[in-house]
Image (cartoon, helix red, strand yellow):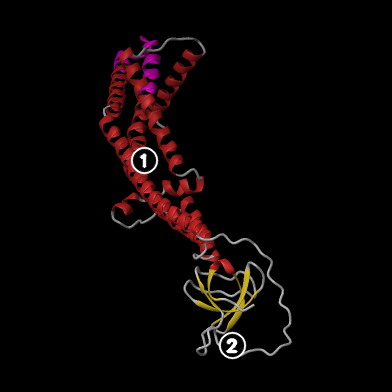
Amino acid sequence: MSVAGFKKQFFKASQMMSEKVGGAEGTKLDEDFKELERKADVTSKAVVDVIGKTSEYLQPNPASRAKLSMLNTVSKIRGQVNSPGYPQPEGLLGESMTKYGRDIGEDNSFGGALVDVGEAMKRLAEVKDSLDIDVKQNFIDPLQAVAEKDIKDIQYHLKKLEGRRLDYDYKKKRQGKIPDEEIRQSLEKFHESKEMAESSMHNLLETDVEQVSQLSAFVESLLQYHRQATEILEEVTERLKERVNEAESRPKREFKPKPRQSFDYGDQEPSNGGYPAGPVREPSCKALYDFVPENDGELGFYEGEIITLVRQIDENWFEGKLRGQTGFFPNNYVEVIVPLSH
């Protein structure tokens, strides 16, 4: 630091101590300047706080929020970014639902419904990706530019103004010991910094058109997101209503203990696969619904198939043959065509 620079720092430090410790009064800034400074300060705080709260709104997860802040929006404009680079909670939930829905089986009502909702959640995650990128590009980044340029310029000029005020006040109180020309130059520099600070604060407050436009873009992005999300949820809601109706129309099966098989010492007739071998009409029935076996020994079939009746186990179960297999099935799933002989 030069001798002149060192002297200036000493003058400012001395004046600051005189004001804080000795109660000396410094040059007062006019009320218009103070009001301008107050408005600029509130606007600056609003910009910084809204940037942080918007990021938290988009991504409550701090790790994902950090990745959002590093998102290269220039690449997005060029079509090089398809996602923000972190998983959305909707997508994680969707993956879980579709996985276990397929494990359960899509022919099962619950399994199929899980797959339906899981696919919808994954679509919601894609829509949320678009929201994050749009808001980052059209709202957060422009505000960040204000924070990094306009607000920093104001802080710089206000700091410089305060330093030049202290320098001028120190020299003014020592008039006679310090040359008048040096005092005059200090006053000119003080006014110059004051004008620069006023200009930078004025420029910030005059960007309200841009700031309102950015807020409008933010709301439009939210509106588009909620419209798309509503469309997706309405589709899956209709699909779930259909599944509920299908499930309600099926006959409810009550749990019945599986009948115990007894060993038959008699001669066994060869199986004919459930199809009549000749003109003699065998006891048979027609399936009214699909029946999916859930236990060993049960006989599965599809609606419309003809099953050969072997015997009636009890008032709720038959034993029958179909496609070379023999097993048990509930009698409320079939219509008897040729009854068993008693």
Q: In the displayed structure, does residue 293 sit left or right of residue 29?
A: right
- Residue situated in front as seen by the camera: 266 or 101: 266
Disc 2 crowd, CA 10 A, few/some/many (<14, 14-19, 20+): some
Residue 32, x across and y down, in percent? 30, 15
Q: Secondary structure at mark 2?
A: loop
Separation of residues labelled 1 and 2 (CA atoms) = 76 Å
Q: Decide if residue 136 is in sight here.
A: no
Q: Amino acid at mark 2?
A: Ser
Image quadrant holding the C terminus, namely: bottom right
Q: Which residue shows up at 50% across the image and 78% down it?
A: 306
Residue at numbered disc 2: 271
Is residue 55 positioned above or below 42 on the image? below
Mark 1 and mark 2 lie on one chain; the one further toward the N terminus is: 1
| Residue under label 1 | 140
Residue 312 x %, y %: 64, 74
Residue 285 against residue 203 in the figure, above or below: below
| Secondary structure mostly taken by the magenta-highlighted segment of the chain | helix
Three-letter amino acid code of the residue under disc 1: Ile
Magenta stretch encompasses residue 159:
no
Question: Where are the magenta residues, as a range?
Answer: 160-185
Q: Residue at x 57, y 85 (%)?
A: 324
Asked if one can make out residue 32 in the rendered structure from this viewpoint, the answer is yes
In which quadrant is the N terminus drawn? top left
Q: In the image, which is nearer the foreground, mark 1 or mark 2?
A: 2
Question: Residue at 66% of width from left, 73% of height from top?
Answer: 313
